[in-house]
Amino acid sequence: MKLLLAIVIIALISITGSRLTFLNRRIPLGFRNILLTGTEYIFAGVLLGTMGLEVLDAETLKMLETFLIFGLSWIGFLFGLQFEFRQLKNLPKFYFSITAVQAFVTFSAVTAAMYLIIDKFVSLPESILFMAAITLGSTASCTAQSALAIVSRNYWFKNRTLLGLMRYISSVDGLFALCFFAVALCIIPGGDVEKFNFIKSIKWLLISATTALVPAVVLILLSRTRFTQQEYLVFLIGTIMFCGGLFYKIHHSPLVAGLICGIITANFCPHRIRALSVVIHAEKSIYIILLLMLGAAWQFSMDYSLVIAGIYFFVRTSGKLIGTFAATRIFKPEYTVPAGLGLGLISEGGLAVAIIINFKLLYPSFSDFLITILILSLFINELLSPKLILAQFSEFEPVSVKEH
């Protein structure tokens, strides 16, 4: 009975939430960005979870785990569909180079800092400590597009090329984050390897690529037949579910499975746009459900997590700032780039949340403090990011859309 009640409540919240928009509400940009990224649904999940009404208790969440796997695979598939290499080639090559340097610097700084600081506060097996640091480094590499969407909708900028660069970085650096996370899972498959084994890591990389290739090929072959819109929806759901479940079965990442499958589909399936429109249509509802389940599973406590969260926020912001500054000086654009551009890229968003959920799915006993770190960082970043984005264009006098 509790499971049925939980499903009904989750469905109502996700359906209602997916139809709400806060882009044009008369509230400060920071709070509007928090609402747009869905942070409030984490706290709704807390209310429904063990710290609240206990509608979504541990037993119920365990029974809903299948949807969690499917949702992560869906998010990864959607992200992968955006990477059609023929389109990416049309953009300036230095865009990719700047994004790569910024992502790598941020990832390296946060991973190293988190490895050292977590080791001081938490007693973890070496392999889990490594994965926790890598996971936080991966989430730090992500840049959400939500803050840029709100700012660009409400303001007009003279330097549109700079805005285009920021949009590119926020679209692509998540790919590096997922690659870092996937490689770490191959180095320590299942979290049970104490020492690095090069041969075993290569084997797991090949297994990962092959496992995601099979459902993608099946979808491409099915797409070459005649089908209705409803049949194609069934093809997509079946492929994403099979791909995510297969990866989870071998104790790998459903999120990465969806990513690989989506990239293959984007570049070899003749119905990429059709697939993209179908997957985007359900994205917000699925994301809201993931946030609700994350909040319900969160066990907050006033301990070392707050200290680690503060250090994470500082190191991540510094990494973004230094990485972007170095990248734009090495690969110099033909237009002026502010020295503090990295401060305009601190919005964290949905992909970072998905990575943390994936970590909890694979390592449930060691994830509570990581969730606390991300949620606190997410709230602060989404609150500050619109103003920091505007600060990068202060020389160019951004004008409100209503005034323009």
Image (spheres, grey):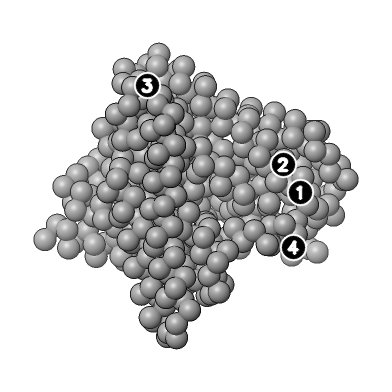
**Mark 3 Cα shell of 10 Å, populated few (<14), some (14-19), many (≥20):** few
**Mark 2 Cα shell of 10 Å, populated few (<14), some (14-19), many (≥20):** some
Give yes or no for contact between labels 4 and 3 (Cβ–Cβ under 8 Å): no
The quadrant in which residue 366 appears is: top left
Q: Amino acid at mark 4?
A: Val
Most foreground residue, 170 or 344: 170
Q: Earlier in the sequence, mark 1 or mark 3?
A: 1
Q: Amino acid at mark 3?
A: Lys
Residue underneath mark 1: 93
Residue underneath mark 4: 401
**Number of numbered discs overlaid on the protein picture:** 4
Q: Secondary structure at mark 4?
A: loop
**Residue at the outermost left position:** 1
Q: Secondary structure at mark 1?
A: helix
Q: Is residue 205 above or below residue 315?
A: below
Q: Earlier in the sequence, mark 4 or mark 1?
A: 1
Residue underneath mark 2: 97
Q: Earlier in the sequence, mark 3 or mark 2?
A: 2
Give yes or no for contact between labels 1 and 2 (Cβ–Cβ under 8 Å): yes
Q: Is residue 38 above or below residue 280?
A: above
State the CA–CA distance, disc 4 to disc 1: 31 Å
Task: Give coordinates of residue 88: x percent, y percent.
Answer: 69, 57
Most foreground residue, 12 or 229: 229
State the CA–CA distance, disc 1 to disc 3: 38 Å
Q: Is residue 138 above or below residue 390?
A: above
Q: Amino acid at mark 1?
A: Lys
State the quadrant of the N terminus: bottom left
State the quadrant of the C terminus: bottom right
Q: Earlier in the sequence, mark 2 or mark 4?
A: 2
Q: Is residue 102 above or below residue 240?
A: above
Q: Which of label 4 and label 1 is nearer to you? A: 1
